[in-house]
Image: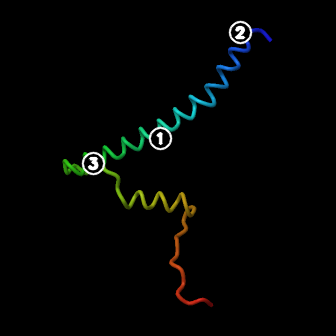
Amino acid sequence: MTFNTLVLSVGCVLCWIVLFPLVVIGGGIALFLLAAGTELSCLITGNQGKSIDPTAAHEMAMRICFGYRTRARAPSRFVR
């Protein structure tokens, strides 16, 4: 194995182990701060045009968590 191949291999391993998780975590933080800033600016200015619609967010969460066309049911009070 030549020295160049060894340096390239170590560099690739470092990128996958160190830089890739940092970029993913940094991207998640940036998206969260963008959403929080948008909601805060809509709250301060009173402009609800860019704000998230709670009913649409609820419907999306229901589809993701419980599948399409299903509804979550309240637990029964009486055990049968």
State the quadrant of the C terminus. Answer: bottom right
Residue 4: mark = 2
**Residue 56: image x %, image y %?**
40, 58
Residue 29, quarter of picture: top left
Q: Which residue: 38% across, 61% down?
A: 55
How far separated are the C-alphas under marks 3 and 1?
18 Å
Q: Is residue 68 left or right of residue 36?
A: right
Name the kind of residue labelled 1 in the image: Gly
Q: Which residue: 52% across, 87% down?
A: 77
Q: Is residue 80 above or below residue 68?
A: below
**Residue 7: image x %, image y %?**
69, 14
How far separated are the C-alphas under marks 2 and 3?
51 Å
Residue at label 3? Answer: 40
Residue 52: mark = none
Q: How many callouts does the rendering have?
A: 3
Q: Which residue: 64% across, 19% down?
A: 11
Q: Is residue 47 above or below residue 30?
A: below
Which marked residue is nearer to the observer: mark 2 or mark 3? Answer: 2
Q: Is residue 3 left or right of residue 45?
A: right
Name the kind of residue labelled 3 in the image: Leu
Name the kind of residue labelled 2 in the image: Asn
Q: Which residue: 52% across, 60% down?
A: 63
